[in-house]
Amino acid sequence: MEITTSRRLTFSLARGVQQLLSLPLMGALYLLDAVIGSIERLIGHKRMPYLFVLPNMAIFAIFILLPLLLNFFFAFTGGTSIIPENRPWVGLGNFERLFACQDITNVSTCREDVFFFAVRNTFLFVIVEVPSMVVLAMLIALALNRDIRLRGFFRSAFFFPVLLSPVVVALVWKWMLQTRGGLINTLLGFFGIAPIEFVLDGNWMMFWSIFVSVWAQVGFYALILLAGLQGIPPVLYEAAEIDGASELQRFWKVTLPMLRPTLLVVLVLSLIRGVQMFDHVYVLTGGGPGTATVLTVQYIYRTAFEPPNNWGMAAAVSLMLAAVLAMLTVIQLILNRRQTEAL
C-alpha cells in the first residue's frame, strides 16, 4: 500500500513538473499563433505563403543575387576600389587584357601568363582526376554491392572522408608529404630510400593534388553508383546467367546499360567539381611550387584578394568559368533527356 501511494505521489509530482515546464512553451505558441493570425487577417489568406518564403528569398537576394549582379558590373569596370561608384567603366578591357599575347603559342609572352597556366593546370587536373574518380568509384560500388563480410563497415570507411572538412583532409596529407618528419618519407627511410622532395616538385604536387581529391570524394560518387546498382532488377542477371553469359558479359550487357543514367550523373558532377576545384589544392599546395598547381578558381581568388586587388579581372575570369559550368550543365540536361527518351 505504501509503495503504491509513493508511486502515485511520484507520478503526480512528475506530471506537475512537466506541466510547469510546458507553460512557457505553450505561452510562446499562443503568442505566435496570435501574431500570425493578425498578419493573416491583415494581408489575406492567399498572401500568407509569400510571407513564409520572404526570409529565404531575402537571404537569396542578399548573398547570391546581389553578388552575382555586382560580379557582372565588376567584370566591365576597372580600378582597385571595391565601391561600385568609384570604379571606371572599361567595357571589354579586362577580357582583352586576359588574352593580350605577343605570341599566342607562347604563354610566357602573354600579359596574364598565370591565367593561362591556371587554365592549363585545370585542364590537366580534370582530364586525369575525373576518369580516375569515375573508374575507382565504379570498382568500389561493384565490390560493395556484393555479399561480402563487413560490407557495412567498408561502406562507412569509404564514405568517411567525404564527411571530413576539405581543409582538414588537405592539412593531414600536407603533413604526410613533408620532406622531414612526413609519414611517407619516414616509411621510405625504413627501406633505405632517400627522402623525396614532394613539395618542391611540380609534377609530384600535381599528382598528389589529384590523388587527395580522388581519395576525399570517391566515396560520395561510389555511394551514388551503389544506389544505381541496387536499383537494377535481379531478374535481369538471372536471365543472363541462364543464357550462359559470363560475369564480364553480364557487366557489359546488363550492368552498364542499366547504370548509364546514374553513371552520366556521376560523370557530370565530378566534371563540374573538377573544373571549380579550389579548397583541397589551395590548402595542400597553395598553387606551388611556382605556378605548377594554380587552378582557375585559385587564380580568381588570388587576383581578387591579394594586392593589388584586381576585382575586375577576377570577375571577368569568373564569368568565363560560369559559362563553362553552364555549358556542362546544358550538356547534362540534353544527355539526360536523350537517356529518358531512349528508355
Image: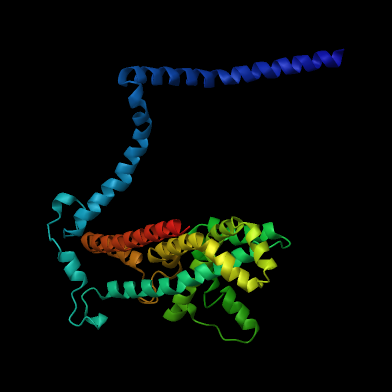
Would you say 89 lies left or right of 318 here?
A: left
Q: Find residue 52 and report its horizontal and vertical position in percent.
A: 38, 31
Q: Position of residue 205 (x, y in %)?
A: 45, 76
Total labels drawn: 0
Q: Whole-percent x and y of residue 230?
A: 61, 56
Which of the two residues, 215 or 175, is positioned nearer the viewer here? 215
Residue at left 20%, top 75%?
111
The image quadrant that residue 337 belongs to is bottom left
Q: Is residue 329 above or below residue 35?
A: below
Examine the rendering and report whether any part of residue 89 can be seen. Answer: yes
Depicted 233 relative to depicted 245: above or below: above
Q: Residue at x 50, y 57 (%)?
A: 165
Q: Quadrant of residue 294?
A: bottom left
Q: Residue furthest right?
A: 1
Residue 112 quadrant: bottom left
Residue 336 is left or right of residue 234, and the answer is: left
**In which quadrant of the rendered image does the N terminus lie?**
top right
* Image-based side of 150 in relation to 63, left or right: right
In the image as oriented, which residue stretches furthest toward the front? 243
Q: Could one spot residue 201 in this view of the protein?
A: no
